[in-house]
Image: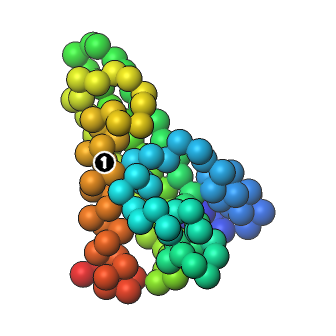
Amino acid sequence: MILNNQVINKEVSQNILEILKKQKYNDMLVKGLPQTDILFKGTEESIIKYIASKSGSITWTGQEMANCRNDGGIISTMYGDYIISIFISNIKDLQINYDNEGIEFGAKIGKIIFDHFIKNKGELK
């Protein structure tokens, strides 16, 4: 809905997208991607136009919810955009750091999807 300007109206949708583009904590989505593309995103030197995302975590020791790390967003590339959402639960590492086991595992998933999308020039076959 954000990409189609359908969240209330075009202005609101574009404002939301701009806020999500400024997210600094998107390790799960970017950690496994080519660093050159991350450093030069939005330029002709990169396959990536932008990344708009929102990460999070849940730490609850009750019986209903396990420890969780998540990230989701829009990866815009020269071949088109794709929407990704990754949730990793039941992790023992409660630290919110770059090498958290949930972030590491999520980054591997994100890399597989990115590589497949790029290899197939924008198609998820």
Q: Residue furthest front?
A: 36
Instruction: Name the one closer to the observer, 94 or 90.
Output: 94
Q: Is residue 106 left or right of residue 80?
A: left
Residue under the image location 44 percent in, 70 percent down: 82
Q: Which residue is mark 1?
A: 106
> Residue 45 at what x, y percent from top left?
57, 79
Seen in the picture, residue 32 relative to 76 is either above or below; the reply is above
Indicate the secondary structure of the residue bearing disc 1.
Answer: helix
Q: Give the quarter of the figure containing the C terminus.
A: bottom left
Q: Is residue 72 left or right of residue 3?
A: left
What colour scheme does the image use? rainbow
Residue under the image location 66 percent in, 68 percent down: 5
> Residue 68 at what x, y percent from top left?
32, 31
Q: Give the quarter of the figure containing the N terminus.
A: bottom right
Can you see residue 9?
no
Q: Is residue 19 left or right of residue 67?
A: right
Residue under the image location 32 percent in, 62 percent down: 111
